[in-house]
Image: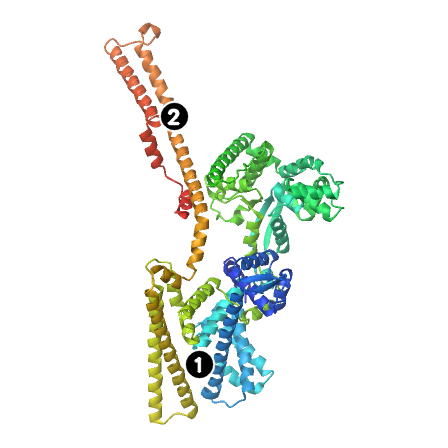
């Protein structure tokens, strides 16, 4: 393929990689690795085992995150320090494997019948298996090279205009078999050419599954050689400034939940510098704050005795810096003192490709007055957030710990934020993207991130993009667009799509399992009946859409679908019997075809019997359920488990009310702020009211107080009119002040009519 085609393939794949498919895929791979490894999987060796089974290694942070999620959801367990599948998950995997194995057998039998009956070839089963294996390899290569596009040429009802690429793959596959068994090549070529004619339902399902698995594997990334050869413009090109607290994490100066994420993020950027171009910087103001921390470290005594250190750590009353230092000192007596680490920090950071940025001139251009205003806004914001949190803690009965920042800390935060804002320079007409904005900040400070989000809603254009992110957030986003680490991409691809249990859609799988469990509860467990029901995508989609509706009856809906399939099975049986009668009468049918029709008749007849049983069983269950009260009905058909819902509802209701109360309070604060702004707006009228009133008073007082010449005819009349106007304006302005400040009805009406921001409306709607 050309470079342009490569480029498009890479971008579309990386776009897919940022979807939830990637997470479901890795979860499926973890489960399959544990199953294949015969219950000898240690958590720390999971990555190596995945590499052994699937030929690639996922990123450590991503692997840990998804493994922990599987543990939380109960799909896997830890026993004797080993990862095991839960009983439910193990049974599910085994059931899926059996279903897929059964489908594989049916596909091979159809393939074998085509060669023996349709092509009338009398060859050994071993030779048929050889052709079959080469045919499967041909299919895998089609999907590897062309992704889901391969489905278009292999599906019997879809045409594909330009299939020259597929012709070359056919030639390659034929030549490969020719090198082993030249006498089978003609037969093999016919199996490829005529596949749309003999493809069974199982074959078509297999193709769809291959397409899904191809998308699933693509979500993990693309061939690294394609990335370096086809990607001309970097996908990400940013300058990322690190806050002081991030530097603390990178230098191991404090203990923090985000420290591991900080280190992993920096490592990820360095390891993938051919794909993501992120310059790492910290400002000279950040370095100054780091150096000032040197004073706080003087109290940390590196000669302290071991019992004293243990007592300190056990007390839990030391800050994160002291805790980190003394824990490291316990492990290694040669640990550098934090003061020494700070002294060497610039060299250490530079060795990690983190450079200091010289920004004093830019900050000077921003101006001290503007920065002082922003500092004031930040202090005010902190006070408001503390007040809200304090009120919430009072209502919820929890302890309140206010956030406090020194003048120096706030000045640093604001200076860093404003210099990053000022560094953004989007030209007129230029597309607004994160790559064009370029400048972002990395911080562990939740208050700073919250303030940044609060301020961005008041800005426009590039300033609407947040400035600060947490390391864990950015790590998650970047991981999702990076390819897995593999040296042999094609081998990894073939291994993944040929592995049973490698599923694309985790949610769909869960929906199917719920349906199967439901059918089992109803006494319906025949393989064909259950398979036909769960393989109907349209039925599953309708069930998923409607099952949360209050007036939706699952029993009736599923019963209707089973009855529909029952009628189809009866019609199929009649059709087979009709064909059999016709062929017998005509006596123009071979023994093999006769056997095939008899077999079809038996299968159709058995299926009708099974559907008949299923319909009777379901109707019997429905009648039994209807005789109970409504509560028992809900318990019988609830997919999620009503008791679990009730338990969670009771536990979370109090928290929901508290959170709703907090949002309502935020809305009230917003309305109060709008009211005060409306009230204060009245004083702008003084700019014209005061001059008019003063002028009117001058005209009403005796003439000898001023020297304005009067017209004999109308001078005093004008004075009187102006005086009356001045008096009227005075009364009007006084009334306006009274209306806005003292009239409770007007104030209440203004608050009610205040337009609430969409953000707060959405928050409140979440708790309705």
Scheme by which the image is coloured: rainbow
What residue did someone put label 1 on?
198
How far from the left and from the top, in percent, is residue 157? Answer: 40, 74
> From the image, which quarter does the N terminus lie in?
bottom right
Q: Is 727 on the left or on the right of 309, as rendered?
A: left
**Classed neighbour count for the residue bearing mark 1: other residues with Cα under 10 Å, few (<14), some (14–19), many (≥20):** some
Q: Which of the 4 quarters of the picture holds residue 703?
A: top left
How far from the left and from the top, in percent, is residue 572? Answer: 35, 80
Relative vertical location of residue 685 with respect to residue 188 in this rendering, above or below? above
Viewer-proximal residue among 708 and 92: 92
First along the sequence among labels 1 and 2: 1
The residue lying at 45 percent from left, 57 percent from top is 644
Q: Are marks 1 and 2 in contact (CB under 8 Å)?
A: no
Q: Which of the 4 quarters of the picture holds residue 234?
A: bottom right
What residue did someone put label 2 on?
684
How far from the left and from the top, in percent, is residue 623? Answer: 32, 68
Q: Can residue 346 be seen in this view?
A: no
Q: Residue 759 carries which label?
A: none
Separation of disc 1 and disc 2 at Cα?
85 Å
Q: Which residue lies furthest to the front in this view?
A: 628
How many marks overall? 2
The residue lying at 61 percent from left, 69 percent from top is 38
Relative vertical location of residue 407 with respect to residue 629 in this rendering, above or below? above
Viewer-proximal residue among 447 and 434: 447
Relative vertical location of residue 575 with respect to residue 236 in this rendering, above or below? below
Dot 2 falls on a residue whose secondary structure is helix
């Amino acid at each position: 393929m050309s470079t342009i085609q490569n480029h498009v393939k890479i971008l579309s794949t990386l776009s897919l990689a940022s979807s939830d498919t990637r997470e479901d895929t890795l979860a499926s791979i973890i489960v399959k690795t544990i199953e294949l490894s015969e219950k000898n999987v240690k958590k720390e060796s999971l990555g190596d085992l995945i590499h052994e089974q699937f030929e690639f290694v996922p990123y450590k942070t991503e692997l840990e995150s998804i493994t922990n999620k599987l543990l939380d959801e109960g799909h896997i367990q830890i026993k004797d320090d080993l990862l095991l599948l839960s009983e439910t998950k193990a049974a599910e995997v085994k059931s899926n494997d059996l279903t897929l194995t059964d489908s594989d057998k049916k596909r091979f039998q159809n393939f074998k019948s085509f060669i023996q009956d349709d092509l009338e070839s009398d060859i050994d089963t071993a030779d048929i298996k050889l052709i079959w294996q080469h045919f499967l390899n041909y299919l895998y290569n089609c999907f590897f090279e062309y992704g889901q596009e391969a489905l278009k040429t292999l599906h019997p009802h879809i045409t594909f205009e330009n299939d020259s690429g597929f012709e070359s793959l056919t030639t390659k596959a034929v030549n490969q078999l020719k090198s082993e068994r030249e006498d089978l090549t003609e037969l093999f070529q016919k199996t490829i050419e005529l596949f749309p004619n003999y493809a069974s339902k199982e074959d078509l399902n297999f193709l769809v599954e291959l397409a899904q698995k191809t998308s699933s594997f693509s979500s993990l990334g693309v061939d690294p050689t394609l990335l370096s050869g086809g990607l001309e413009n970097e996908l990400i090109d940013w300058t990322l400034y690190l806050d002081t607290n991030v530097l603390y994490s990178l230098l191991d100066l404090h203990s923090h939940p985000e420290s591991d994420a900080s280190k992993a993020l920096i490592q990820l950027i360095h390891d993938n510098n051919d794909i993501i171009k992120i310059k790492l910087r910290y400002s000279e103001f950040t370095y100054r704050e780091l150096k000032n921390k040197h004073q706080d470290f003087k109290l940390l005594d590196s000669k302290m005795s071991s019992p004293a250190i243990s007592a300190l750590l056990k007390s839990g009353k030391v800050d994160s810096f002291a805790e980190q230092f003394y824990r490291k000192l316990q492990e290694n007596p040669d640990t550098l003192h934090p003061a020494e680490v700070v002294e060497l920090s610039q060299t250490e950071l530079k060795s990690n490709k983190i450079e200091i940025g010289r920004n004093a001139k830019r900050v000077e251009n921003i101006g001290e007055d503007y920065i002082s205003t922003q500092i004031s806004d930040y202090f005010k914001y902190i006070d408001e957030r503390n007040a809200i949190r304090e009120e919430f803690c009072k209502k919820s009965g929890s302890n309140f710990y206010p956030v406090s920042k020194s003048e120096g800390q706030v000045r640093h935060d604001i200076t860093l934020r404003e210099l990053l804002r000022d560094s953004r320079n989007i030209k007129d007409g230029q597309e607004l993207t994160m790559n064009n904005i370029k400048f972002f900040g990395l911080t562990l400070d939740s208050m700073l991130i919250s303030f940044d989000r609060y301020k961005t809603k008041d800005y426009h254009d590039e300033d609407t993009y947040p400035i600060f992110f947490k390391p864990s957030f950015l790590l998650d986003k970047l991981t999702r667009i990076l390819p897995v680490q593999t040296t042999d991409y094609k081998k990894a691809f073939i291994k993944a799509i040929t592995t049973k249990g490698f599923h694309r859609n985790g949610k769909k799988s869960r929906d199917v399992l719920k349906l199967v469990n439901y059918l089992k509860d109803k006494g319906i467990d025949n393989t064909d009946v259950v398979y036909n029901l769960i393989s109907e995508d349209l039925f599953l989609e309708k069930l998923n859409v409607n099952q949360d509706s209050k007036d939706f009856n699952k029993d009736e809906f599923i019963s209707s679908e089973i009855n529909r399939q029952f009628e189809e099975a009866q019609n199929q049986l009649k059709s087979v019997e009709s064909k059999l009668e016709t062929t017998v009468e005509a006596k123009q049918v071979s023994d093999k075809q006769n056997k095939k029709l008899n077999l079809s008749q038996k299968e159709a007849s058995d299926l009708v019997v099974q559907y008949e049983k299923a319909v009777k069983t379901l109707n019997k269950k429905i009648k039994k359920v209807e005789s109970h009260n409504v509560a028992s009905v809900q318990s019988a058909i609830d997919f999620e488990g009503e008791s679990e819902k009730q338990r969670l509802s009771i536990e979370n209701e109090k928290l929901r009310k508290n959170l709703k109360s907090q949002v309502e309070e935020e809305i009230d604060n917003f309305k109060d702020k709008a009211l005060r702004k409306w009230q204060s707006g009245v004083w702008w009228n003084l700019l014209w009211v005061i001059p008019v009133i003063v002028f009117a008073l001058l005209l009403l007082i005796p003439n000898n107080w001023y020297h304005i010449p009067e017209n004999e005819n109308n001078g005093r009349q004008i004075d009187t009119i102006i005086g009356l106007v001045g008096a009227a304006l005075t009364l009007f302005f006084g009334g306006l002040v009274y209306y806005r400040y003292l009239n409770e009805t007007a104030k209440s009406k203004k608050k009610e009519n205040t337009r609430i921001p969409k953000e707060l409306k959405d928050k409140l709607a979440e708790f309705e």
